[in-house]
Image (cartoon, grey):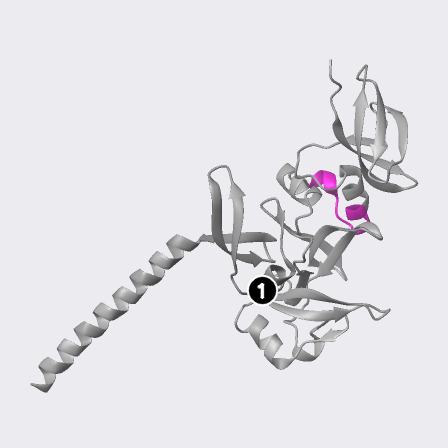
């Protein structure tokens, strides 16, 4: 009988790691981490977790520890919110507390993130008391310009900008205004390592989508090759696709409607002049 390979999370030296596990008796598992570390561990060990569903990116134990550090109880959250957090999706948390004899509210956006160099972390962004001002709009050592600020705050659009680290490394980031936080929120930009329906984006495709364009991308499907107009929502952190054929039809319908409208206006104008 073929051994079933399980996807797992294991905590080693206070760090949660991903791995795979197999067992002959269902009690003792042979684990191999993504860093090629191999060892045996018993089922039920508090340092071993089995992946709940394919989209899970973080261990429940990892999320609990991180959220507790931000004064958020993971166990008290609804199950759908718990699942969203371990998938790496953002969650807006509101809570009340007493200060100086008054009840006050705390609002913050939390999101589990992963870095190949530093591992997992919890990103926490606290809501501003007042909407952010231009001089306060900074991220990754970048001061947003008036044009960038207006595009985000007034127009409600996403921009791409060049950020930099303390050691001088530069990188592209996406930014938009989040009214729920009264602040600018940033997200990772798409790169040539980003997958779209099982295939990597080209550098040109990633750059175009980051700039808000809708490039045509062809993918292989069970029914053959299909081409889509592709954009990206950093808020939802998901791709938005449109059928090229349907988009062309919609444009033709709009053009036809405009042409008909212009003809009607001309006829009315001619009737008035008579």
User: How many marks on residues?
Assistant: 1
The image quadrant that residue 271 belongs to is bottom left
Identified at 52% across, 51% down, the residue is 218
Q: Does the rendering let one see residue 178?
A: no
Quarter of the picture containing the N terminus is top right
Magenta span includes 83: no
Residue occupying the far front of the picture:
224
Residue occupying the far bottom of the picture:
273
Q: Residues within 10 Å of mark 1 (few under 14, many from 20)?
A: some
The image quadrant that residue 254 belongs to is bottom left
Looking at the image, residue 32 sits to the left or right of residue 4; the answer is right
Tag 1 secondary structure: helix
State whether residue 70 is above or below residue 271: above
Magenta span includes 71: yes
State whether residue 176 is above or below residue 136: above
Residue 222: horizontal and vertical position, in percent?
50, 37
Q: Does the rendering let one see residue 159?
A: yes
Residue 274: horizontal and vertical position, in percent?
6, 85
Residue 86: horizontal and vertical position, in percent?
71, 42
Residue occupying the far left of the picture:
274
Residue 133: horizontal and vertical position, in percent?
66, 77
List the residue tagged with mark 1. 208
Range shown magenta: 66-77
Looking at the image, residue 197 sits to the left or right of residue 242; the answer is right
170 or 52: which is nearer to us?
170
């Amino acid at each position: 009988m073929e051994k079933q390979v399980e996807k797992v999370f294991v905590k080693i030296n206070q760090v949660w790691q991903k791995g795979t596990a197999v067992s002959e008796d269902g009690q003792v598992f042979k684990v191999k981490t993504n860093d090629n570390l191999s060892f045996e561990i018993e089922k039920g060990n508090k340092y071993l977790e089995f992946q709940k569903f394919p989209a899970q990116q973080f261990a429940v134990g990892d999320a609990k520890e991180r959220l507790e550090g931000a004064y958020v109880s993971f166990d008290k959250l609804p199950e759908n919110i718990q699942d969203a957090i371990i998938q790496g999706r953002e969650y807006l948390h509101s809570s009340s507390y007493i200060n100086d004899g008054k009840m006050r509210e705390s609002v913050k956006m939390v999101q589990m993130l992963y870095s190949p160099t530093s591992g997992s972390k919890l990103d926490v962004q606290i809501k501003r008391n007042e909407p952010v001002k231009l001089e306060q709009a900074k991220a990754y050592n970048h001061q947003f310009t008036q044009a960038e600020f207006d595009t985000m705050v007034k127009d409600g659009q996403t921009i791409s900008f060049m950020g930099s680290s303390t050691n001088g490394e530069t990188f592209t980031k996406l930014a938009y205004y989040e009214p729920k936080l009264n602040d600018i929120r940033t997200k990772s930009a798409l790169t040539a390592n980003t997958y779209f329906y099982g295939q990597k984006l080209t550098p040109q495709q990633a750059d175009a989508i980051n700039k808000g364009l809708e490039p045509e991308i062809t993918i292989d499907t069970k029914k053959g090759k299909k081409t889509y107009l592709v954009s990206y929502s950093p808020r939802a952190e998901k791709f938005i696709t449109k059928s090229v054929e349907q988009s062309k039809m919609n444009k033709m319908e709009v053009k036809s409607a405009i042409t008909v409208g212009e003809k009607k206006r001309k006829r009315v104008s001619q009737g008035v002049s008579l």
